[in-house]
């Protein structure tokens, strides 16, 4: 079974540009999550999809961030326009059921975003 | 505010030695606590998941303990190997509608030297 995969693994962009991150969850996992870690901080929740529906986007920092999951399969996270403080590692995770109690969440390797 | 605090921030031990990592949390109401291992350049990988009723759980050379009364957990690594060098992250979930939101500690960076 393939794990959670993320593309690209690294991205360096200039301030003001647009970047789109992609996440392919484990097949059959309806729940998909985006998390990120900015420099020196802990990993923090961004949002949660169940299939194609956004269940919770309370962790999204501002309206420059847009996440989609058309068709309930892969998800994209677009940052437009990117700012310096957006630099960090963006993780995607998926789970069969909703993460909680004993449900396992599987993480991708992350996308390291550097805004210069 | 729900928080997860870990200590030490970093640790260096010799191969074959044991070590214990600490986690204190203020998350309430508490649902479960997880320990993750994160190798450099990789995503976090789950080691153990414990609910409030579990005091200890093992996964090979990794043993996690939980005291839900004092809101403390520890991860004990026995007979360390070079491949144990990684960040170890304590993660807690709230009980209730937000249980899917994992609340991460900042991790302990462990280096195992030959």
Image (cartoon, coloured by chain):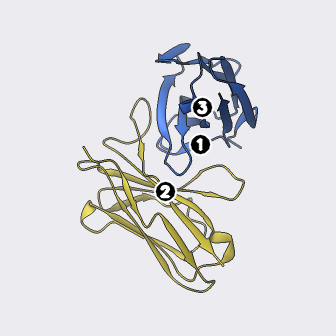
Chain colours: A yellow, B blue
Nearer to the camera, A17 or B113: B113
Say if labels 2 and 3 share a chain.
no
**Chain letter of the residue beneath label 3 in the structure image:** B
Q: How far apart are marks 2 and 3 (CA)?
A: 30 Å
Which residue corresponds to mark 2?
Answer: A110
Quarter of the image for the N terminus of chain B: give it: top right
Q: Can residue B94 be spotted in the picture?
A: no
Q: Residue A50 carries which label?
A: none
Quarter of the image for the C terminus of chain B: give it: top right
Q: What element carries label 2?
A: loop
Residue B50 left/right relative to A5: right
Q: Residue A29: x, y in percent?
A: 29, 48
Q: Is residue B3 above or below residue B30?
A: below
Tell which tag, 1 or 3, sits nearer the viewer. Answer: 1
Which residue corresponds to mark 1?
Answer: B103
Q: In this view, does B35 lie above or below B76?
A: below
Q: Which mark is residue B29?
A: 3
Q: Residue A77: x, y in percent?
A: 45, 69
- Disc 2, disc 1: CB below 8 Å? no
**Chain letter of the residue beneath label 1 in the structure image:** B
Nearer to the camera, A88 or A53: A88
Q: In this view, does B85 lie above or below A25?
A: above
Q: Can residue B56 be spotted in the picture?
A: yes
Tell which tag, 2 or 1, sits nearer the viewer. Answer: 2
Furthest residue in direction bottom, as rendered: A16
């Amino acid at each position: 079974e393939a794990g959670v995969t993320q593309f690209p693994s690294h991205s360096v962009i200039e301030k003001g540009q647009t970047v789109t991150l992609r996440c392919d969850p484990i097949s059959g996992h309806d729940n998909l999550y985006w998390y990120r870690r900015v420099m020196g901080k802990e990993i923090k929740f961004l949002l949660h999809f169940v299939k194609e529906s956004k269940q919770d986007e309370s962790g999204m920092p501002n309206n420059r961030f847009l996440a989609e999951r058309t068709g309930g399969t892969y998800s994209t996270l677009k940052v437009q326009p990117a700012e310096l403080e957006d630099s960090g590692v963006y993780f995607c995770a998926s789970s069969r059921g909703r993460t909680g109690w004993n449900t396992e969440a599987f993480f991708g390797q992350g996308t390291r975003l550097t805004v210069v | 505010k729900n928080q997860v605090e870990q200590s030490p921030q970093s640790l260096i031990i010799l191969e074959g030695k044991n070590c214990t990592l600490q986690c204190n949390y203020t998350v309430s109401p508490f649902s479960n606590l997880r320990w993750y291992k994160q190798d450099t350049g990789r995503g976090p990988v789950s080691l153990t998941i414990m609910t409030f009723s579990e005091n200890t759980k093992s996964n090979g050379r990794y043993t996690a303990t939980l005291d839900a009364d004092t809101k403390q957990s520890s991860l004990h690594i026995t007979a360390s190997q070079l491949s144990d060098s990684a960040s170890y992250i304590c993660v807690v979930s709230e009980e209730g509608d937000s249980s899917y939101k994992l609340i991460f500690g900042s991790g302990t960076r462990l280096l195992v030297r030959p």
